[in-house]
């Protein structure tokens, strides 16, 4: 899942490359329906919107081949359990979440993450948005711990795969 807004700096396709087979269902979380109908990922995507979604923009998305589904939300965030039920009703039993800090922290906070695949680049970027978004902890004992399953090189990057070991604080 990915948030794609009209202000998006990139224009991801959300497709699979370098393999054989069909692309998976593209799912976009967009509480206010700000996704551009011209976005490459929008055509044929399933776009979840919240109660405050801009209906004109939703109609534009539908006109460009997206399926728009309204789910409950609050303060600009979608109720993720409703999204997952809607996906399950469509036969989706596995989900790859590719998102920014807000989306990722929401899935983490609600205990909806079974495994992590983190790509680590050997670059120091300085001040940037943390992967954990708005998650805050008062001690290391409260943090989310990843039990590492594998670490391997992928090009110049490292891929760390692990499963979360949740703390009671989440």
Image (spheres, grey):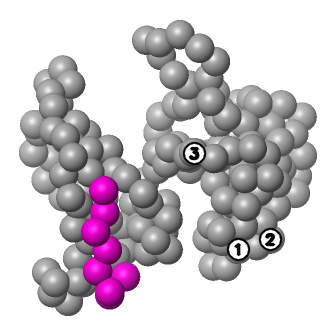
| Image: 51 above or below 13 | below
Which secondary structure dominates the residues rendered in magenta? Answer: loop
The quadrant holding residue 124 is top left
Q: Is residue 9 left or right of residue 120?
A: right
- For the point 47% across and 34% down, which residue is it? 10
Q: Secondary structure at mark 3?
A: loop
Q: Which residues are magenta?
A: 163-170
Mark 2 vs 1, N-terminal side = 2
Mark seen at residue 73: 1
Q: Secondary structure at mark 1?
A: strand
Give the labeled residue for mark 2.
51
- Reply yes or no: does residue 91 show up in magenta: no
Q: Is residue 18 left or right of residue 161?
A: right
Mark 3 vs 2, N-terminal side = 2
**Does the residue at mark 1 contact the one at mark 3 (Cβ under 8 Å)?**
no
Instruction: Say which of marks 3 and 2 sits in front.
Output: 3
Distance of label 3 from label 2 (alpha carbons): 26 Å
Instruction: Say which of marks 1 and 3 sits in front.
Output: 3
Mark seen at residue 94: 3
| Image: 132 above or below 48 | below
- For the point 31% across and 74% down, which residue is it? 166
Distance of label 2 from label 1 (alpha carbons): 6 Å
Mark 1 vs 3, N-terminal side = 1
| Image: 117 above or below 170 | above
Give the total number of marks visible in the rendering.
3
Image coordinates for residue 51, horizontal then vertical, percent: 80, 71
């Amino acid at each position: 899942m990915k948030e794609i807004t009209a202000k998006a700096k990139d224009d991801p396709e959300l497709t699979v490359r370098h393999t054989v087979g069909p692309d998976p269902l593209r799912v976009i979380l967009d509480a206010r329906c700000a996704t551009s109908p011209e976005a490459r990922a929008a055509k044929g995507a399933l776009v979840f919107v919240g109660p405050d979604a801009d209906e004109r923009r939703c109609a534009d998305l539908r006109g460009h081949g997206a399926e728009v589904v309204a789910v409950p939300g609050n303060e600009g965030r979608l109720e993720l359990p409703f999204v997952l039920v809607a996906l399950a009703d469509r036969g989706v039993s596995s989900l790859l979440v590719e998102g920014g800090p807000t989306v990722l922290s929401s899935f983490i906070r609600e205990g909806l993450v079974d495994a992590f695949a983190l790509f680590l680049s050997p670059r120091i970027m300085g001040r940037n948005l943390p992967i954990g978004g708005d998650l805050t902890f008062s001690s290391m004992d409260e943090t989310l711990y990843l039990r590492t399953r594998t670490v391997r090189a992928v090009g110049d990057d490292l891929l760390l795969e692990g499963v979360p070991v949740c703390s009671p604080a989440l």
